[in-house]
Image: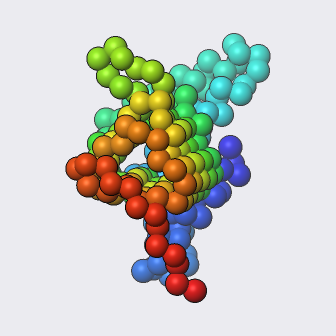
């Protein structure tokens, strides 16, 4: 748990490039996304406590914290998710995550990652490493999104996306990522 939180912290700290090193570290603790990620990591940790009966007080604390994160920040990350280290939530509100993600994934506000509705759920999305999900994007159903993928703002993804692609627009148009300048 603590190693994951350290790597999450680094992602949030690195986003504070406008400030000096001390202020950047302090600002991280006031970021809504970081607080939500720490509560998520704590919730995942409560599932590892054995014997199970000893976990109940910790799970109660998690449920209370998660309630306040949901209501105050508008961010819900299910403890059922398996999310790698370096998870970054860049903005406040309208975020629902019920899917698995790899390392160093970033999401914006208004993002939904989860199952289909209306009783037609067939599973949860699986995202690879280094995936960026833009503001308002939706990733729905049992699909696979590869590593190093950019999903543009307000894009709805309901089909598999291979590695290294950029997905944008009302209609999903996939294009390979341009090579990075060196």
- How is colour applied across the structure in the image? rainbow
Quadrant of res 25 = bottom right
- The residue positioned 76% from the left and 21% from the top of the image is 50
Residue 53, position in %: x, y?
A: 69, 13
- The residue positioned 53% from the left and 68% from the top of the image is 13
State how many labels appear. 0
Quadrant of res 71 = top left
- The residue positioned 62% from the left and 18% from the top of the image is 56
The residue positioned farthest toward the left in the image shown = 170
Where is 159 relative to 22, above or below? above
Instruction: Say whether residue 95 is visible.
Output: no
Instruction: Say whether residue 157 is visible.
Output: yes
Q: Nearer the viewer, residue 82 or 79?
A: 82
Q: Nearer the viewer, residue 155 or 74?
A: 155
Where is 20 relative to 29, above or below? below
Q: Nearer the viewer, residue 62 or 138?
A: 138
Q: Nearer the viewer, residue 97 or 182?
A: 182
Residue 126, position in %: x, y?
A: 53, 38
Where is 25 relative to 111, above or below? below
Location of the C terminus (image quadrant) = bottom right
- The residue positioned 41% from the left and 39% from the top of the image is 159
Where is 122 relative to 146, above or below? above
Location of the N terminus (image quadrant) = top right
Residue 44, position in %: x, y?
A: 61, 33
The residue positioned farthest toward the bottom in the image shown = 182
Residue 72, position in %: x, y?
A: 31, 41
């Amino acid at each position: 748990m603590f190693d994951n939180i350290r790597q999450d912290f680094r992602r949030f700290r690195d986003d504070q490039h406008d400030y000096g090193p001390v202020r950047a570290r302090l600002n991280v603790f006031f970021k809504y996304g970081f607080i939500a990620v720490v509560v998520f990591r704590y919730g995942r940790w409560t599932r590892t406590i054995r014997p199970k009966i000893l976990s109940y007080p910790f799970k109660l604390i998690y449920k209370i914290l998660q309630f306040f994160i949901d209501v105050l920040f508008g961010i819900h990350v299910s403890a059922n998710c398996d999310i790698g280290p370096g998870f970054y939530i860049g903005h406040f509100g309208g975020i629902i995550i019920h899917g698995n993600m790899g390392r160093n994934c970033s999401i914006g506000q208004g993002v939904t990652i989860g199952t289909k509705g209306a009783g037609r759920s067939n599973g949860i999305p699986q995202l690879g490493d280094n995936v960026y999900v833009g503001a308002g994007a939706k990733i729905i159903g049992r699909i696979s999104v590869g590593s190093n993928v950019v999903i543009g703002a307000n894009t709805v993804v309901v089909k598999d996306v291979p590695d290294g692609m950029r997905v944008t627009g009302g209609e999903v148009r996939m294009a390979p990522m341009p090579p990075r300048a060196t």
